[in-house]
Image (tube, coloured by chain):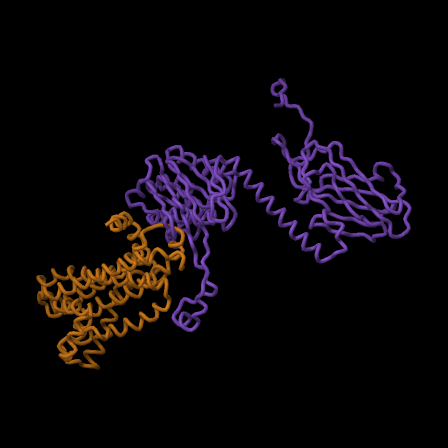
Amino acid sequence: MKTIKEIYEYRTMIQSLVRRDLRGRYKGSVLGFLWTFINPLLQLVVYTIVFSVIMRAGIEKFYLFLFVALVPWLFFSSSIMNGAMCVLQQQDMVKKIYFPRQVLPIASVTSCFVNMLLSFVVIFAVLIFSGYGINLQAVLYLPVVMLVEYILALGIALITSALTVYFRDLEHILSIITMAWLYLTPIMYSVDMVPEQFLPIFYLNPMTPVIIVYRDILYYKTVPEIATLFQALLIGILAMLVGNYVFSKLQKGFVEEL
Amino acid sequence: MMQKENAIEVKDLKKKFKVYLDKGNDLKEKILFRKRNQYEDRWVLKGISFNVKKGEAVGLIGKNGCGKSTTLKMLSRIMYPTEGSIEIQGRVSSLLELGAGFHPDMSGRENIYTNASILGLTKKEIDNRLERIIAFSELEEFIDNPVRTYSSGMYMRLAFSVAINVDADILLIDEILAVGDIGFQTKCMEKLREIKKEGATIIIVSHAMGQIEQICDRVIWIEDGKIKEEGIPKFIDDKYLASMEEKRLSKVDNKKNQQQKLSNQEKQKSSWSDRVIRSGNRDVEIVDVAMLNDNTGKNIYKTGEPITVLVDYKVNKPVESADFTIGIARDDGIYCYGSGVMLDSQKPSSIQEKGQVQIQLTQNELLPGKYFLDVGIQSADGVLYDAVCSVLEFHITTDRVTEYGIVSMKHIWQVDGKQIEKV
């Protein structure tokens, strides 16, 4: 409780770190902040070409099917990867100044989250202008699932950020893990394609329900099943609790390790 | 429970560091070179306890590595104690690092927001302080330029202005008052005094005794992870400096002893300082140099106290007359005094095969400091027989400083025609 209150007091720091990160990312490039929109749009163009023209997957509007799942996935994986490096990158600050250390992973994940929100502007633009349309009632659930995913991503980022300080290899191991994780999550395929005997294992993956909900809302344009959403929320909270516990244990030794 | 009047209570604080012999941070190194992960425990703090009252200013002194900065880091919660406890009442601001989070491409104004937010201020609090911070930094004209265009002095000024305007109850400062030019430093000291007057508690780690004496009510002297002494700044500072000097001297002694072992021939010169430089053809040789009025063996005199120098010589080649000289230089190399037999008498003195020369400096007016003695023997026409530079080290001290510089001068002050009495 005390930690939460303290982190709240440092909210301006989180804001400025996020702002610095977002602004710093495209600093010096000609198109600057526009890249935040151009990047996902170009990705979408590539997927459209590949999957509608060359590799037909047998799923209608496959590029949309893929894209509405891929954007949330990119948020999740970049949260883990950037999160892993966030304490190390700010080590000068960590070594010299006191602030609740949780601020760093929170700012890192939030920055990825803001990026995803900006990508969603592109998604909505495409959904509307391509005539695919959206179901407003279903979209009401979108903030909920985003919040759930945020909690899940933050929980895992707390763990990876703290562990990487002690064990630098984690950064590289994580890039393999996230790649494998991408293929083990129903992003490029639907859950229906998974052989039945593997299904229980698939549902152990915390990202499976999250992706299913995103796709329900945006691709199938239906209200997601509350049970699925609830399952995702439970896993998210669990990750958060574990993450917070691990982080607060490990952060005491940060300065000596860095 | 903490006592109400205390801002900080430290009880039996201990800190252990793991010192890795050769550290491997990744998996390969951790598995393959398990031996490399051997470490020793080093206790940097071996149990220190102190309280700091609200509104008090305390200085931590001690030589490098004694644990004072570690203490400060634990007070600011950057590190955690291995054992013992720290209790703190009030908002802490630690000025251990200036300009944290500064982004070179952002303007001074934006960086104020980033930096202050890292120090724990909210947007509203920063808004309220913005004018004050900019005014204090004296960077009004440049505040909207990117920080990368700043000179390093401007950069530090901006950073310090943010830090000093945080308005903490407890301010922890580590050696950062050496910022900017003298004018800005004076301003910082004034600001600190003002902050203290407003009731803030201040803890400073510094090697600048002057600064500590200006601000602190109390000094804690840490040595080898323990509190050696604490008390009034002036008193402790002097003791601290004296002990540092003593340590240095004993080190010099050690070195000298080692040199002795190396060459037995030089044995008779055991009292000679390690800085001695010798030259000359040794037709006449200096055998020993000693200073009288020297009961301690440390060659310490007071200003005004006479000094007597004895020089033993022996003749190696038949020489009938010679000139003797002495010189005194301060430890920073400034030549303070010189005298010679021939300068006084205009002719060389006849000498025996073996003998002793004595010079009494009956009116020693040197002011406190460390000095070195040079002694020389030369022929009447200036051929150097033997000279030893910095052969002896001696110290001039005083009970009370009343003058500055190299020598004391007789003087009388008159203010508006009225003579000032010396006390």
Q: Is residue B273 left or right of residue B191?
A: right
Measuring from the top left, give residue B157's x and y in whole percent: 44, 44
In the displayed orientation, state which residue is furthest to the top.
B418
Colour chain B is painted in? purple
**Quadrant assignment, res B121:** top left
Would you identify the image quadrant in which residue B10 lies?
Answer: top left
Q: Position of residue B385 (x, y in %)?
A: 83, 50
A105 vs B268: above or below? below
Label tally = 0
Q: Is residue B57 above or below residue B284?
A: above
Chain A hue? orange
**Residue A240 in which image quadrant:** bottom left
| Residue B377 on image: x %, y % | 82, 46
Quadrant of the rendering where the C terminus of chain A is positioned: bottom left
Near-viewer residue (B274 or A101): B274
**Residue A136 left/right relative to B420:** left
Above-or-below relation of B8 to A104:
above
Residue depicted at 76% across the width and 40% down the height: B309
Expressed as whole percent of the image width and height from the top left, the position of residue B390 reads 72, 47
In front here: B271 or A68? B271
A20 to the left or right of B299: left
Which residue is nearer to you in this view: B188 or B395? B395
